[in-house]
Image (cartoon, rainbow, N blue to C red):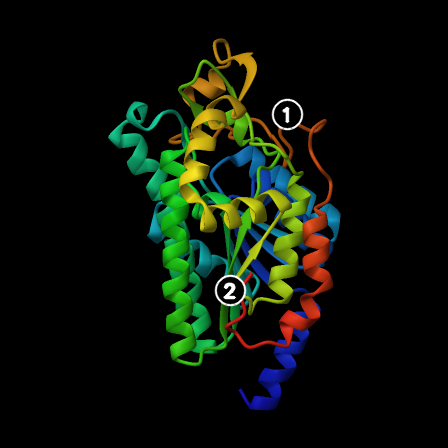
Amino acid sequence: MTATQDATRTTERRGQGRVVVVTGSSGGIGRAVAEELGRHGDRVALLARGATGLQAAARAVEAAGGTALPLQVDVSDFQAVDSAATEVERTFGPIDVWVNVAFATVFARSWDVTPEEYARTTEVSYLGFVYGTLAALHRMRPRDRGVIVQVGSALAYRGIPLQAAYCAAKHAVQGFHESVRCELLAEGSGVDVTMLQMPGLNTPQFSWVRAKLPHRPQPVAPIYQPEVAARAVARAIEHPRRRERWVGASTALTLMANAVVPGLLDRYLAMTGIKSQQTDEPVAGHRDNEEGNLWKPQDEDRDYGSHGRFDKQGKARSYQQLLAWAFAGRGNRLSRSGSA
C-alpha cells in the first residue's frame, strides 16, 4: 500500500469515527464514557463481564449515534484482553484510543479484607489497567500514534478508611502511569498517556460492591453524576498531552491538602471517613452488598446503567472542570511536561 493510499484509508476510517476501547463499560463510569463517545460518532468496543449490562450498553452507544462491539472479558486475564484487542482491530480497524476503567473492590476495614479479596482487587483494579495498557501499546507503538486514558481517583494519592484495597490499587496505577509516560517521552513516541483523578460519583458500584459494613456504602460527598466523568474523559482524549487532570473541586482540594498537611488529613479522615461512607440503611437483606462483584458480575442478568442510587445528591456538572477547560488553551500550548 502506498503512502497516499494509506493516508486515504486513514481519513476514511476517521470519518467513520475513532476506534475506542472502554473497559468496565457495562455500567458506571465506563458506561457513561461509552455513551458519551457514542455521541461523538465513535466506534466503541465495550469490554466487561456482565452479559446483560454489555448488551444494554451496546444499545445505548448505538442509540447515541456510535457503533458498538460488546465483548465479554475479565480484564484480570491478559490473554483475554489481548484477544479482545485483536478482535476489535479485526472488526473496526486500528485502535485509536484505549480507556481503562474496570475495577472491583471491597468496602471494609483493612484487617477484615481477606488475602484472596486483596489479590482479586489488585488483579482487576491494578493489573487490569496494566494489561489493557500493554494490549494498547503493543498495537499503538509500532504505528506511533494513539491515546491511552487511565481513569483514576483522588484515592490514587490519598488513602482513606474502608478502602485500603482500592486505594492501594489506584496508587499502583498512578506509579505505573508515570513510568509508562516517561518511557514514551524518552523514545519520542507519538502515543499519549494521560490519567484522570475522579471524585465521588453516583455509580452502581455502591449497589454491587462487596461490603463488610453495618450499613450500605455510599460515595464521599460531594457526589457527581457519572456524566461529569464521561465529559472529562472525552476532553482528555481530545487533549491527551497533559499528564493528569483533576475532576471536581473535591478532588482538587483533597489532593492539595494531602500535599501540604497529610498528617492533619489523616486525623480528619479518621474522625469522618468511616461514617461519611455509609448510609443509614443496614446492609442486612441486600445480598448484592454481601456477595459483591469481585468474582461474579452483578450485571450478568440485570442492567444497572451508569447511575447509582444517589441521583438526588448527584451534581450534574463540575464548575472546577469548566474553569479548567477555560484555561485549556493555554495548557495545550505548553510542552508535554504540563500537569494538572
| Residue 145 drawn above or below residue 43 | below
Q: Is residue 251 left or right of residue 175?
A: right
Q: Residues within 10 Å of mark 2 (few under 14, many from 20)?
A: many
Residue 315 is situated, as x and y percent measured from the top left of the image, at: 71, 37
Q: Residues within 10 Å of mark 1 (few under 14, many from 20)?
A: some
Residue 39 is situated, as x and y percent measured from the top left of the image, at: 73, 53
Check residue 309 in the rendering and tell me which mark sits there, or answer none: 1
* Towards the viewer: 14 or 91: 14
Residue 198 can be seen, yes or no:
yes
| Residue 217 drawn above or below residue 92 | above
* Residue displayed at 51% across by 30% down: 300
**Badge 2 is on which residue?**
243
* Towards the viewer: 330 or 66: 330
Q: Amino acid at mark 2?
A: Arg
| Residue 199 drawn above or below residue 291 | below
Residue 93 is situated, as x and y percent measured from the top left of the image, at: 55, 67
Q: Is residue 155 left or right of residue 4?
A: left
* Residue displayed at 61% across by 61% down: 236
Q: Earlier in the sequence, mark 1 or mark 2?
A: 2
Give SS at disc 1: loop
